Image (cartoon, rainbow, N blue to C red):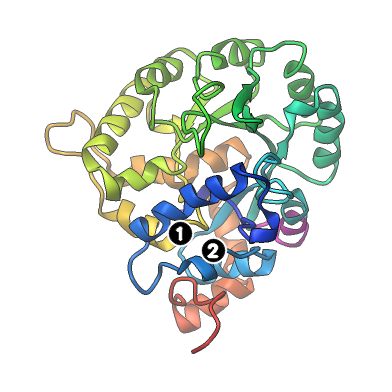
């Protein structure tokens, strides 16, 4: 099946990129689960992991070390933790320009800049961004500040700028607080108003399922333009299968298979590790829903392809001639993270 990684990041975890108290704390949380989801031989040690991922390294890991066809790179505006936001917009623009058939780019917009956010969004859209990424909370002087998606004065002008540019996909970090912050801004109760005001925009709830499962399933049931993106949530297939069962049951029942988007959360987990785990995962016999090939094909890539007008058969044929497909066909997949490890 045609597979698109719905959210992935060429992070910058180098110590020089970490800001204040929050940056190291944020990095500690992300590294904390790295060895729990990557097997020995794939998992990096802390020194290897604390790197500034370069775009070409990222491409080699995603497409020479895994069976992915495409990836949606999200740049990040987490300037309270990382000097470059965590996953720099410049990397997204480079990847989109140089690998347009492999990469979708959602550009992170810093909404804490207020009115300047519109100009920032327009700049990224002019550079080829396929969507926008929002991060609704930040850490300031020991407390959490947050904004809401139903803020008509702050958010709606940015959504209008995207729509005017022909971009109709936005992703919002929700549900999953990272580091020493509270859950302000992580609830999903602000999405319905925005989805109702912009019915032609697809709103993707990133990390859907970690919290607010009931609230999310009701949004899926009531708003046809709200989607559940399983960044990090998909890891529950390895870490907590019963919780994964509940998430998939509820989201499939209320939203249908057309409203779920796969993500590996690479490059913190290795993408092939997550692909293999999901290939083995299935709902229990007691579930009223089956994960047949048709259902898997939708959430593993078909839904995101549809949202971006991608003909998967035509794109698959086009990708067959690029260097990633050619190397994989000759040599198979490289070992996990071997593209960034120094030879012994």
Q: How many labels does the image show?
A: 2
Q: Pick whichever, 324 or 214, lies toward us.
A: 214
Q: Which disc number belongs to residue 271?
A: 1
Q: Main secondary structure of the magenta part?
A: helix
In this rendering, would 179 be left or right of 239? right
Graded by Cα atoms within 10 Å as few (under 14), some (14 to 19) or many (20 or more), the crowding at tag 2 reads many
In this rendering, would 311 be left or right of 280? right
Residue 186 in the image: x percent, y percent? 52, 25
Relative to 334, residue 200 above or below: above
Instruction: Answer with the quarter of the image where residue 276 lies.
Output: bottom left
Q: Pick whichever, 333 or 171, lies toward us.
A: 171
Q: Give the range drawn in magenta.
A: 94-101
Report helix, strand or loop for mark 2: helix
Q: Residue at x 45, y 75 (%)?
A: 333
Query: Disc 2 marks which residue?
Result: 62
In this rendering, would 188 be left or right of 17? left
Report helix, strand or loop for mark 1: helix
Q: Is residue 95 magenta?
A: yes
Relative to 61, residue 86 above or below: above
Tell whether label 2 touches label 1 (CB within 8 Å).
Answer: yes
Q: Which label's residue is closer to the chain start, 1 or 2?
A: 2
- Distance between mark 1 and mark 2 Cα atoms: 7 Å
Q: Pick whichever, 256 or 137, lies toward us.
A: 137
Q: Residue at x 65, y 54 (%)?
A: 103
Residue 342 in the image: x percent, y percent? 55, 83
Residue sitting at the far left: 286
Q: Pick whichever, 331 or 41, lies toward us.
A: 41
Q: Which disc number belongs to residue 323?
A: none
């Amino acid at each position: 099946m045609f597979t698109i990684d719905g959210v992935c990041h060429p992070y910058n975890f180098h110590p020089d990129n970490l800001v204040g108290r929050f940056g190291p704390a944020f990095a500690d949380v992300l590294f904390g689960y790295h060895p729990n989801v990557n097997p020995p031989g794939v998992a990096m040690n802390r020194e290897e992991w604390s790197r500034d991922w370069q775009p070409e390294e990222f491409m080699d890991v995603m497409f020479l070390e895994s069976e992915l066809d495409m990836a949606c790179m999200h740049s990040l505006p987490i300037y309270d933790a990382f000097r470059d936001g965590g996953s720099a917009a410049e990397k997204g623009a480079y990847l989109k320009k140089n690998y347009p058939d492999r990469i979708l780019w959602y550009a992170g917009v810093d909404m804490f800049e207020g009115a300047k956010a519109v100009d920032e969004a327009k700049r990224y859209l002019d550079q080829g961004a396929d969507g926008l990424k929002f991060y609704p909370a930040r850490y300031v002087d020991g407390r959490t500040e947050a904004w809401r998606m139903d803020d008509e004065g702050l958010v709606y002008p940015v959504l209008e700028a995207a729509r005017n540019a022909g971009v109709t996909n936005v992703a919002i970090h929700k549900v999953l607080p990272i580091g020493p912050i509270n859950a302000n801004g992580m609830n999903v109760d602000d999405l319905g108003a925005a989805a109702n005001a912009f019915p032609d925009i697809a709103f993707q709830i990133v990390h859907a399922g970690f919290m607010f499962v009931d609230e999310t399933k009701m949004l899926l049931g009531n708003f046809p333009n709200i989607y559940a993106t399983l960044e990090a949530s998909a890891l529950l297939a390895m870490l907590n299968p019963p919780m994964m069962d509940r998430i998939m049951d509820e989201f499939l029942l209320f939203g249908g298979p057309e409203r779920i988007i796969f993500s590996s959360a690479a490059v913190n987990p290795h993408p092939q590790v997550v692909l293999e785990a999901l290939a083995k995962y299935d709902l229990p016999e007691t579930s009223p829903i089956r994960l047949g090939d048709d259902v898997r094909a939708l959430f593993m890539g078909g839904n995101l392809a549809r949202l971006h007008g991608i003909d998967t058969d035509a794109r698959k044929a086009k990708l067959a001639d690029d260097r990633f497909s050619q190397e994989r066909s000759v040599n198979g997949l490289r070992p996990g993270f071997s593209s960034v490890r120094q030879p012994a």
